[in-house]
Image (cartoon, rainbow, N blue to C red):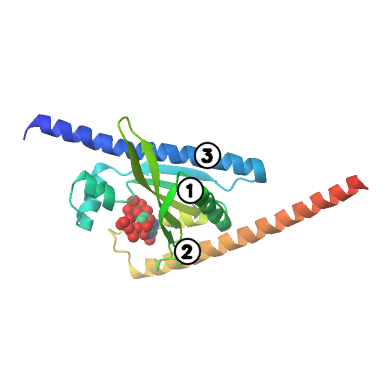
Amino acid sequence: INPNHFKDRKKELLRFLMGYKFALEQLKTKIDLLKSEFKHIHDYNPIEHVTSRVKTPESIMRKAQKKGCPLTLESIRKNIRDIAGLRITCSFESDIYVIHRMLEEHGDVNIIEEKDYINNPKGNGYRSLHLIVEVPVFMTDREQRVLVEIQIRTIAMDFWASLEHKIFYKYNREIPEHIKHELAEAAEVAHMLDKKMEALHTEVNLIKSNQEEDEEVETIQ
Ligand code: 0O2
């Protein structure tokens, strides 16, 4: 093995991953701005928190091998669409679609794939809205279109998914039947909680806007 060759490949790989890191930084800034503007206009914040990660080279290689895709950077760029991942957590289900719409209307963000696991939950109970978006990234010598996977979910969906993820790996991907059953039930309970919290939120908003209307009438009189 020629150590210089390895050094060059490592540099190439780090540059490749840098594009994904930049794409995430840009998206996080865009989402931050959308959040501030939305809050300014509607006096309400639809986003609880945002997290992001770039897959490790080991995890990218594992996924590429699993998918049977050639281990070249070009093929990996095309076939592994979640090298950069952004997760947006909201309080309410309707917020998820508010954010979806804001992203759809954003000129710099091109949504190329959508998977709605909220209206079509997975068999195990998993719910989230998944988007694959393409964003332009300006490197020193070129503009690159970079793919990012955005997962948008409520706090309850996120709680369920992170526990299920831990259990999945704890049992080495073979979850016992009775635990699968309990998890599916827990997903339904989380869904009911989402519905209940949203109904409460809507009711309180209605009371608040009625009060504001009454106060306006009083001031006019
Ligand atoms: P990690 O460790 O979170 O990154 P793909 O193989 O990605 O091209 P796939 O699997 O059909 O195609 O994509 P999908 O359905 O959009 O899911 C991708 C990601 O969503 C997963 O990434 C998980 O993060 C999450 N996800 C999907 N299904 C489940 C689920 O049943 N439970 C939990 N907890 N998370 C889920 P990774 O790469 O599998 O894992």
Residue 167 visible to the viewer: no
Q: CA distance from mark 2 to mark 3?
A: 29 Å
Reading the image, the residue beneath label 2 is: 187
User: Which residue corresponds to the image point at 22% horizontal and 35% vertical from the top-left?
Assistant: 12
Kindly check if marks 1 and 3 are in contact, taking CB atoms under 8 A apart as contact.
no
Left or right: where 20 falls relative to 27:
left
**Depicted 154 relative to depicted 73: above or below:** below
Sequence-first disc among 1 and 2: 1
Q: CA distance from mark 1 to mark 3?
A: 11 Å
Instruction: Report the residue at 48% width, 43% height from top.
Output: 50
The residue under the point 51% across, 44% down is 49
Q: Pointers 1 and 2 in contact (CB under 8 A)?
A: no
The x and y percentages for residue 153 are 49, 54
Circle 1 residue: 88
- Could you say which is closer to the camera, residue 221 or residue 107? 107
Could you classify mark 2 by the number of other residues whose Cα lies within 10 Å: few (under 14), some (14-19), or many (20 or more)?
Answer: many
Q: Residue furthest left?
A: 1
**Which comes sooner in the sequence, label 2 or label 3?**
3
Badge 2 amino acid: Ala
- Residue drawn at 17 percent across, 35 percent down: 9
Kindly state the secondary structure of the residue where label 3 is placed. helix
Is any part of residue 58 visible from this angle?
yes
Question: Label 3: how many residues lie within 10 Å, few (<14), some (14-19) or many (20+)?
Answer: some
Marks 2/3 in contact by CB < 8 Å: the verdict is: no
| Pointer 3 residue | 32
Q: Amino acid at mark 1?
A: Ile
**Residue 128 in picture, x, y percent from top left:** 46, 58
Camera-nearest label, 1 or 3: 3
